[in-house]
């Protein structure tokens, strides 16, 4: 434990400044210098996890390999650094309080009065330290959700104050704030940053490094002013301007010496500045990619963050195919027979998105029918795959009432059935089939050719599954079940070999797609679309 160092990333002034991107960038830069890192997220809300939250509330729910439903920032951490996060990388106020209450009920506290300090703060500190100790990381980067001054994040900030006091130079505070530009006055204003730092100081935390989010370039005078008013060294005031892509942030942070500032504060050796070669190659390719490919996302959540990992996975795949992917959201609730042609017109490929519940499902089924009968490259993910299966059962096998038990409990042809182990579950949170599972691919199938392997592992988040009693009927009619879990026999992948690209996966490939290791299914999907366009 003695060697692990801790970096705490907080935010001030307003939320959504990009603490997750800065945390991921710090991780990337330290990794490039040969350090073993991990990144953790503290979410101040009282939900145990975001699994039961509406995507409109919180964006997509990201799933770790060990089946933890987490905040979408963990997706950024993995995409930037290729680390695998786990349950230990995501903590909410709800989980902390639940752990303390469970201990109190067991009698672990020997009759003591349970208080925020020391019991809640000790539990937070225990989780931060345990993450460093367990895997012998050089650095644990901890991002605190919300904004300084929020009531909810106070216990987390108190825990950080204590850790900084206990660990000295082994703990560094990075504070991200906003420098607004007032158009009427033609001026950049540093007062919000000063107030935010003052707020942090009133809790007992002096930030070591300030990252200033800004839409305009900050000159040296502004940086000097912030440094002197906030008691921060001049070389520890970094500006984070708006950039065309989030993937340019690590390079921008490196150019300004963010990693150097952190290492100096911690008394670490600097060595040579890493080149970030493969990362810069990716950025070069993205700048050179001028040709466009249009992909429609058929789903029910009209919100960028609801399909964050899918969007990123497709855009990365585009760059590796030297094309820019232009994504269009197509609301599945608005799709009907009269407008489907118009809504899907101009799209080179279609992704039928995941989701839960009945709303918008009939539109997804109509989209699957249109793309199948017009041979438009189509990728169905989780519920998207299930909609492809239902469409095929209705229009090819002739079961006009075919459905999923999730949508219609009385259907005579439940081609999508509830999983055996899900039948008697009453609690909704954290009880689905979650996390990474094995999948065995059929030799010579399209999927097997794409993966170049028969054995794969992918992450899941679902309660319902393909009903295996229909498998032979589907295969006779041309929809092949080419991926299976070797233990449960659960169908993981369906494909129609007779079409250009028509594949559905029960799992979520987007959770494994990263900047330097894009997912083969996305890469091949985009490649096929480009060839099809020609």
Image (spheres, rainbow, N blue to C red):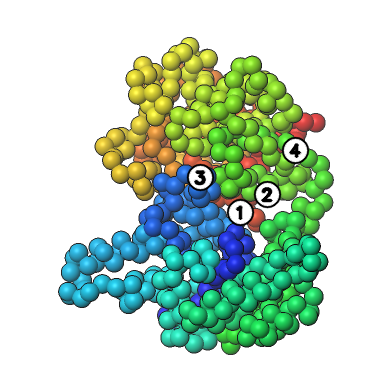
- Determine the secondary structure under disc 3: helix
Residue in the picture at 50% in, 48% down: 57
Residue in the picture at 58% in, 48% down: 305
Per the model, the C-alpha gap separating discs 2 and 3 is: 23 Å
- Determine the secondary structure under disc 4: strand
Q: Residue furthest toward the front?
A: 184
Q: Which residue is mark 2?
A: 316
Location of the C terminus by quadrant is: top right
Q: Which residue is mark 1?
A: 514
Q: Which residue is mark 3?
A: 55
Q: Which residue is mark 4?
A: 293
Name the side, left or right, on which 197 lies relative to 63.
Answer: right
Q: Dot 4, crowdedness within 10 Å: few (<14), some or many (≥20)? A: many
Residue in the picture at 57% in, 68% down: 11
The quarter holding residue 165 reads bottom left
Per the model, the C-alpha gap separating discs 4 and 1 is: 20 Å
- The earlier-in-sequence mark between 4 and 1 is 4
- The earlier-in-sequence mark between 1 and 3 is 3
Per the model, the C-alpha gap separating discs 1 and 3 is: 22 Å
Q: Nearer the viewer, residue 208 or 284?
A: 208
Residue in the picture at 50% in, 80% down: 202
Q: Nearer the viewer, mark 4 or mark 1?
A: 4
The quarter holding residue 48 reads bottom left
Return the mark for residue 95.
none
């Amino acid at each position: 434990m003695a060697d692990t160092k801790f970096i705490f990333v907080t935010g001030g002034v307003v939320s959504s400044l990009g603490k997750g991107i800065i945390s991921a960038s710090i991780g990337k830069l330290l990794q490039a210098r040969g350090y073993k890192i991990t990144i953790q997220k503290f979410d101040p809300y009282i939900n145990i996890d975001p699994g039961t939250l509406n995507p409109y509330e919180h964006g997509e729910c990201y799933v770790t390999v060990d089946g933890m439903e987490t905040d979408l920032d963990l997706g950024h951490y993995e995409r930037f650094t290729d680390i695998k996060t786990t349950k230990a990388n995501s903590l909410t106020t709800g989980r902390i309080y639940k752990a303390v209450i469970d201990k109190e009920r067991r009698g672990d506290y020997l009759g003591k009065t349970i208080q925020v300090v020391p019991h809640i703060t000790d539990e937070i500190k225990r989780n931060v330290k345990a993450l460093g100790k367990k895997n012998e990381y050089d650095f644990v980067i901890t991002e605190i959700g919300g904004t300084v001054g929020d009531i909810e994040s106070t216990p987390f900030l108190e825990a950080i104050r204590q850790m900084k006091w206990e660990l000295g130079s082994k703990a560094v505070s990075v504070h991200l704030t906003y420098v607004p530009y007032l158009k009427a006055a033609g001026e950049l204003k540093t007062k919000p940053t000063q107030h935010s730092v003052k707020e942090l100081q009133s809790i007992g935390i002096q930030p070591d490094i300030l990252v200033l989010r800004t839409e305009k370039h900050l000159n040296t005078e502004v940086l000097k002013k912030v440094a002197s008013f906030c008691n921060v060294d001049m070389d520890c005031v970094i500006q984070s301007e708006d950039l065309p892509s989030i993937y340019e942030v690590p390079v921008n942070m490196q150019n300004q010496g963010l990693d150097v500032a952190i290492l100096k504060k911690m008394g670490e050796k600097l060595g040579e500045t890493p080149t970030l070669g493969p990362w810069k190659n990716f950025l070069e390719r993205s700048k050179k990619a001028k040709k466009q490919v249009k992909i429609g996302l058929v789903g029910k959540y009209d919100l960028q963050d609801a399909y964050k990992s899918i969007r990123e996975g497709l855009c990365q795949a585009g760059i590796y195919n030297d094309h820019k992917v232009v994504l269009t959201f197509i609301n599945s609730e608005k799709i009907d027979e009269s407008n489907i042609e118009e809504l899907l017109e101009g799209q080179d490929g279609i992704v039928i998105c995941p989701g839960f519940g009945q709303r918008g499902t009939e539109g997804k089924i109509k989209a699957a029918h249109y793309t199948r009968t017009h041979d438009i490259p189509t990728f169905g993910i989780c519920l998207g795959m299930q909609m492809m299966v239902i469409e095929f059962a209705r229009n090819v096998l002739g079961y006009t009432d075919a459905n999923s038990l999730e949508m219609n409990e009385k259907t005579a042809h439940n081609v999508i059935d509830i999983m055996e182990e899900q039948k008697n579950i009453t609690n909704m949170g954290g009880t689905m089939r979650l996390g990474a599972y094995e999948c065995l691919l059929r030799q010579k199938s399209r999927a097997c050719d794409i993966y170049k392997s028969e054995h794969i592992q992918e992450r899941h988040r679902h309660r319902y599954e393909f009903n295996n009693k229909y498998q032979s009927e589907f295969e006779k009619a041309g929809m092949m079940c080419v991926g299976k879990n070797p233990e449960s026999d659960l169908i993981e992948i369906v494909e129609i070999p007779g079409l250009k690209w028509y594949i559905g996966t029960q799992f979520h490939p987007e959770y494994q797609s990263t900047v330097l290791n894009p997912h083969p299914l996305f890469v091949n999907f985009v490649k096929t679309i480009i060839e099809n366009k020609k």
